[in-house]
Image: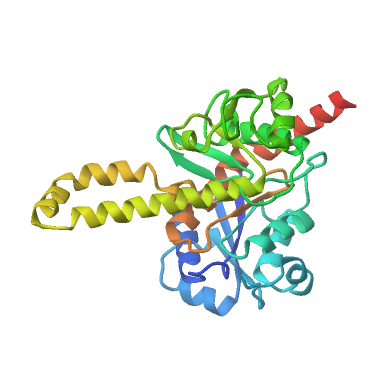
Amino acid sequence: MAELVKVAVDAMGGDNAPGEVVKGAVEAAKESSVLKVYLVGKEDLIKAELAKYTYTPEQIEIVNAEEVIEMAEAPVMAIRRKKDSSIVKALNLVKDGTCDAYVSAGSTGATLVGGQVIVGRIKGVERPPLAPLIPTATGATLLIDCGANVDARPSHLVQFAKMGSIYMENACGIKNPKVGIINIGAEEEKGNALVKETFPLLKNCPDINFVGSVEARDISAGAVDVAVCEAFVGNVVLKMYEGVGNTILKAVKQGLMSDLRTKIGAFLIKPALKTTLKKFDAHAYGGAPLLGLNGLVVKTHGSSKAVEIKNSILQCVTFKEQNINEKIREKIIVEGTREG
């Protein structure tokens, strides 16, 4: 029998909690027989939601937590003061080994702080990066970092590239993934001080398939499998990516509904259009893992519905089954030994 993958889910996190979170957990459990979900939050509310569904009781357990960390709260203070919060209790389940992974649509700041303070970094990892998969014309690209380290150093970006390569190769099955550093031009001499200093380090790194600079406009075309940057740039790229996508989609819908002729055309192309748009659905990839910790921490959008919660939980199964943390740990230890 396959080893169970145990995932602690913050049932109170996000705009649609606990309803969509519980629904997503139930759907994930139905899709994976090796999964056990620990729903952490207010027990009475979780029980009321679970009563709506049929599920295998052995696959879902409730862990009561009476407090909730709100989005607007200061992350460090909230983690310290709210010991009975769903975020803190769920992260402690990973810390003490009860669970392999944690998933939340709640406070990003509290998840980032709690991940590092409670779960802890793998020895040798300087800064854990937040790394979402973003849809491209050829599949998906890992954007690393998109929100955890706004003042990164060159050595941090090199580690991001190595961890991102391991993730893409093992979680997504991409052999020898192409790594690029986000820049304002393709030439090696371009960029700010951080990019200029990091470029030669990546170029001379034997552990990755570095292909040079990648401009933001080329990411959506699938120019690289891993796009490396510090968190300020990554977050701007991610938010612009999402915003432009939503704007274009709304414009297309408005155009197709403008008169009778376009409505008929919309009806005819609907099946092909749905298939095409599905390729660019970011929700299909689950959440953003915070790589380099002693356990997996995954942050999903605050507005996540059940499908994204489900995919984020199933993402944890792949992460565990592919031993990604162990591979990152081995890489960092080997690197540290080599430098020592």
- In this rendering, does residue 112 appear at all? yes
Residue 170 sits above or below residue 58 on the image: above
Pinpoint residue 321: horizontal percent, then vertical percent: 59, 39
Q: Tell me where residue 90 sits by quadrant.
A: bottom right
Residue 287 sits above or below residue 88 on the image: above
Give the colour scheme shown. Answer: rainbow
Pinpoint residue 181: horizontal percent, then vertical percent: 62, 32
The quadrant the N terminus occupies is top right
- In this rendering, does residue 31 appear at all? no
Q: Is residue 129 left or right of residue 12?
A: right
Pinpoint residue 285: horizontal percent, then vertical percent: 48, 46
Q: Nearer the viewer, residue 44 or 84?
A: 84
Which residue sits at x=9%, y=52%? Answer: 261
Which residue sits at x=71%, y=55%? Answer: 94
The quadrant the C terminus occupies is top right
Pinpoint residue 63: horizontal percent, then vertical percent: 64, 69
Residue 333 sits above or below residue 49 on the image: above
Q: Nearer the viewer, residue 38 or 107?
A: 107
Which residue sits at x=53%, y=73%? Answer: 46
Q: Is residue 180 left or right of residue 21?
A: right
Q: Nearer the viewer, residue 48 or 193?
A: 193
Which residue sits at x=69%, y=27%? Answer: 199
Q: Tell me where residue 161 sits by quadrant.
A: top right
